[in-house]
Structure formats: C-alpha cells, structure tokens
Image: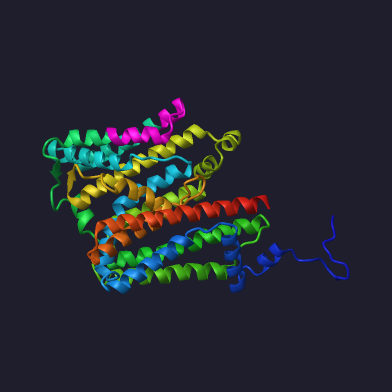
Amino acid sequence: MTDNTQPGSTGPLLDRSDVRVKHADTVGGTVGAFVDKVRSGDLGSLPVIVGLIIICTVFQTLNPVFLAPNNLVNLLFDCSTVGVIALGIVCILMVGEIDLSVGSVSGFSSALLGVMWVNDGWPIAVAILAALVLGAAIGALYSFLFNRFGMPSFVSTLAGLLTWLGLQLYLLGSTGSINLPYGSPLVSFGQTLVMPDVVSYALAGLAGIVIFATGYRTAMRRREAGLSASSLGRLLFQAAAVVVVLEFIVHYLNQGRGIPWMFGLFVGLCVVMNYALTRTKWGRSMMAVGGNREAARRAGINVRRIYLSAFMLCSTLAAAGGIMAASRLASSSQQAGTGDVNLNAIAAAVIGGTSLFGGRGSAYSALLGIIVIQSIASGLTLLDLSSSLRYMITGAVLAVAVIVDSLARRSRLSHGRA
C-alpha cells in the first residue's frame, strides 16, 4: 500500500478527481466538471445549442415574426417529417456507415401508401404497415449486401437511391401524384391536429419526473458500487430546471395553435431511441461496433446482427418519414423525397452532433439538427430571400459541424494518449 503524502505534510493528499467528486454538487464543481468535459473533446450538444441561439437571435432581430408562436408551430410541423428520417441516419452513422437512399425510400413509401390506400382501396392501417415493412426489407437488403459481399454502404445505397426513385415514378404513373382524402385522420394528423393544452403541460411535467427517476436510479446504483453519485438535491434541481423550461415553451406555443401531435410523435421516437442507445445492450453494441469493429467482434458482439439492425432501422424510419410527409402535403407525388430531403436528413444528424466517424452520437442529434435547418429555412422565407441562400448557409453550418466534430475527436484521442 502506497503512502500518498508529501514531505512535511500531516495526511494523505487529495487527488484532483477526489476534490472534483467532493465538490461535485457545488456550482463551482459542476462548472469545473463541465469545463473538463469540453477540454477533453466531449462537447455534447453545446455547439448546436449555441448555434441555434445565434440563428434565432439574428432572425428575430431582422423579423420579429420569427419567434411568434404560430410561426414556431409551423416550424415544428415541418421539422417532424425530415426529422424522423434523420433519426434513422443517426442509427446508421453510429456504426460508421451511411445511407444515401433515405430520400428515395421515403418518396417510394409515400407513393406506395397512395396507391394502396387511394387507388386500390386498402385500409389505411394496412397500407401504412405495408410501407413500413417494405422499408425494413430494403434495409435488410442493404445489410445482406454489406455483410455477405462486403459491398460498401455508399455504393449499395447510391444504387438504391436510383432504384427506389424509379419505382416511385413507376407507381405514380403519368399523373405524377395521388391526392389523399382531405379531412382523413392521416391528413389531419399532418396538417391540423395539435395537443390539448392540458396534455402538453402534463407531458412537460412527465419529462421532469422521468429525468429525476432515471438520475436517482443511476445514483443509487453508483452508490451501491462504491462510486461517486449526484446528491438528491442536485437531481431535484436538474429535474425542476427542465420542467420550468419545458413548461415555459409549452405555454408560449399554446398562445398560438399549440404543439402538433406529429412533432410529439417525432420527440417520442427520439426518447425511445435514446433509451435504446444508452440503456440497452444493443445500444452499447452499436457504439462499440462504430468505434472499432474488430474489437467489438473479439468482445463477442454479433457484428453482422448489429449492422442488420442499423440498416433496417434507418430504412424503416425513412419509410415512416415518407408517410408523414404524405400526410403533411395531403398527396403522394413525384416530388416527395426528392430535392433536399436526402441531404437535409444527413445534415441534420451531423449538425446535431452525431459523428461521421462512428461510435458517437445521440438520438437527440436528429431533433436539434433538424430544428437548426428548419429555423434557417423559416427565417430566410420570412425575409423573402432566395432559397439559394438557404443551401449556402446550411452547407456552411454543416461544414462547421464536421470541423467541430473532427477537432473534438482529435482532442479525445490526445487526452486518451495522455
């Protein structure tokens, strides 16, 4: 046993980490721990939150309508469709791969929904389920080509982009579009349905309860293992702060039309995916495979199965995004899934903080990233500026996000060697 003392001292020295643990529940200790995380390259969502604040400040200064409740409600409607697709991109980026066909898959699913529901008279629930199953089958095909033949995901999904786009055009035929029944539950869901005030307030409060319960459970487990853990007071403060912020946002949005159910579905999917990525064996395996495939294989992880789940989730969520886009537009058309849908979905995941190098990311990356992209689009539209500026600004934000990710990765590697 070593004696951790200095000459002339009367007791053992406290290691810096011990001091940090001892004062973890003080304001200074919390700030210090946060600064240490940033210096080590663990930036989390900090860059995108700072960027979002800057974007909102600039556009609100130029046009006071930007932060008006109803404009924000419209923004949330628009975020949901591409956001769900971006959530799938997060899954595939986590394992260090890419899917370039998500836009075409979403458009194909939209066309399939219109053909089966409107033209062929299938029940709407069956048509939606069939589109989602087909999306999962597309992901399984990509996984088979990757696992069996070693075909790079860039190549297989690029081929898929062209294939599913062609099938979309074939299904829609010469008319080029299929109008969905206006006033149907699906169309109302995408255009008008918002949560009752009491439901939105209750969900905001529930978020704080879940955060406290999760933190308390983690703290108890750490104490049982003899590790440092957050105090009850700190957990209560964090949960209360989240509730206050969320309740304020809900109250502000309820001054307009209210919070869309479509956006609520998107956020719910993010919460479920975040739990799966951070609290399950599957999620830890996803990060391990994305970080080092060979090391994960030697650790006993079924790497092929992880790739299969990632590809299938990505394509299934792309199909879900296509269905939501059809409900938003009340039509299945040749333009669905084309244009900037593909690039915005990928950009949203990266801008939100998911690493292009694999092994690092969060389900909330899709949420934050798509809000940034849609905020830029909404602000420029209100200013009546050319859409060319939106592409240039979004491209610049994406470039900055990748640079930040690269610098953070380099910082983590240097601290790891140290």
- Of residue 193 and residue 199, the one placed in the foreground of this image is 193
Residue 159 shown in magenta: yes
Q: Residue 192 occupies which quadrant of the picture?
A: bottom left
- Of residue 330 and residue 99, the one placed in the foreground of this image is 99
Which percent across, then down, holds residue 293? 55, 37
Horizontal side of 199 relative to 354 (left or right) equals: left
Q: Residue furthest right?
A: 8
Coloration of the structure image: rainbow
Q: What segment carries the magenta color?
A: 143-163
The total number of labels drawn is: 0
Which percent across, then down, holds residue 390? 30, 57
Task: From this view, report whether residue 194 is shown above or below residue 254.
Answer: above
Which percent across, then down, holds residue 174? 11, 36
Instruction: Tell me which residue sits at (62%, 67%) in the image.
Output: 24
Task: From this view, report whether residue 157 is shown above or below residue 35.
Answer: above
Q: Residue furthest top?
A: 149
Horizontal side of 167 relative to 248 (left or right) equals: left
Residue 149 shown in magenta: yes
Q: Residue 130 occupies which quadrant of the picture?
A: top left
Instruction: Tell me which residue sits at (61%, 73%) in the image.
Output: 28
